[in-house]
Amino acid sequence: MRMRNPFRYGSRVTGGAFFDRERIIRDMLDVIDGGNNIVLYGPRRYGKSSLVGEIMSRLRGKGWVCAEVNLMDVASLEDFVSQYARALYREASPVVGTIRHVAGLFKRVTPAVSISDDGRPELKFEISSRKAGVAALRDVLELPAKICPAGRTLVVFDEFQEVESLGLGQQFERTMRSVIQNQPDIAYVFLGSKTHMLERMFASPSRPFYNSAQKFMLSRPPVEESRRFVVERFRSVGISISEPLAEKVVTLAGNVPYYVQAVSSWVYGTVAGGRSKTVRSADVDEAFHSFYATETILLESVFASRPESQRLLMRALAKEPSARFDETYRDRHSLPSTSTVNTALRRLVKESIVESQNGVYTLADPLLAYHLASK
């Protein structure tokens, strides 16, 4: 009987398949338990959502109410109010009881029941007046302190930098900040993949959320931690992989948790159907190239969508990460003038396509770097 693939990617990962992040989990839980807020930075595919999902899972096991809204799924201010109210009620309903009680807490937001596409009843919250946007926002932001248990509630906003697109600009941030600073018994976690934008929101003295949360940067894990994870997960399904080959998997994956899980998953698929339960170097090579082949269209679309100056710089950084873009470097990679390169660099950093590690600029996505360096 074939065992279930022990590696997970493409969706939130918790439990046994979660990529080991015990130290940062302990540190974040200490901050949350103290009633303080957190902002979590990190590029895409580093496992931010899975990390916070694991934290919520552990807190729920201790009786906490944990509500979450992903701002990437929110289209407008009205949509935010509705989704946030629904998320809070869904999580806190065992504590607060009937919807009638919750409805009495609102002035401008009306709960209603509709029928979803699959025929099931679905709870929605609607703003009673389109002109009451900011007031309705304040209503819903005050809800956690009214219906959730003090000292045992966590609210998570994923892709939080997207509040800038909801039509209120910094007024949204000012309103939210003014409310949550008066909620010392509710802990908040803000996270997002556009590191530059999120960092500006919490590190700029001119922004409402300046210095309002403990900052955590989610970087690549230690290589030995990643290697151990790969070895142990294969062992859990009776497959042996040597430490050197596990490290090869980690290296090909750029030591990014998403890619470590993905490449390992493809290695499992290569080995599991055969007679041998030992991973060979050829298995790792075959699995990596099979996985890479499924990603090439997406990688090429990311590259092709950028202006020419950005494409040239991306290709240069894929082949040669650098801290300086002097004339020698620009000539070697056929780059345009210094001012054009600097403009392209700022845009790529803002979009989290390029990151700086110890002052050296490199592509944030190792598979994109591999793709461009191979061209």
Image (cartoon, grey):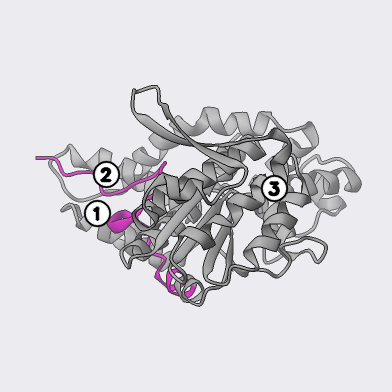
Residue 326 picture location, percent across and down = 85, 54
Q: What residue type is labelled 3?
A: Ala
Q: How far apart are marks 1 and 3 (CA)?
A: 53 Å
* Quarter of the image with the N terminus in it: top left
- Drawn side of residue 244 relative to residue 238, left or right: right
Q: Distance between the residues labelled 3 and 2?
A: 53 Å
Residue 330 picture location, percent across and down = 82, 47
Q: Do the residues labelled 1 and 2 touch (CB within 8 Å)?
A: yes
Residue 343 picture location, percent across and down = 84, 45
Q: Kindly tell me whether residue 138 is visible in this rendering.
A: yes
Q: Which amino acid does label 2 sit on?
A: Tyr
Q: Do the residues labelled 1 and 3 touch (CB within 8 Å)?
A: no
Task: Name the residue tied to disc 3.
Answer: 135
Residue 176 picture location, percent across and down = 67, 56
Seen in the picture, residue 162 relative to 148 is either above or below; the reply is above
For mark 3, does the 10 Å Cα neighbourhood hold few (<14), some (14 to 19), or many (20 or more) residues? some
Q: Which residues lie in the magenta part?
A: 1-27
Task: Name the residue tied to disc 2.
Answer: 268
Task: Name the residue tied to disc 1.
Answer: 234
* SS class, disc 3: helix
Residue 165, quarter of picture: top right
Residue at image x 42%, y 55%?
53
- Drawn side of residue 95 relative to residue 107, left or right: left
* SS class, disc 2: helix
Observer-nearest of 183 and 96: 96
The secondary structure making up most of the magenta span is loop
* SS class, disc 1: helix
Seen in the picture, residue 228 relative to 83 is either above or below; the reply is below
Seen in the picture, residue 347 relative to 46 is either above or below; the reply is above
Residue 323 is covered by the magenta coloring: no
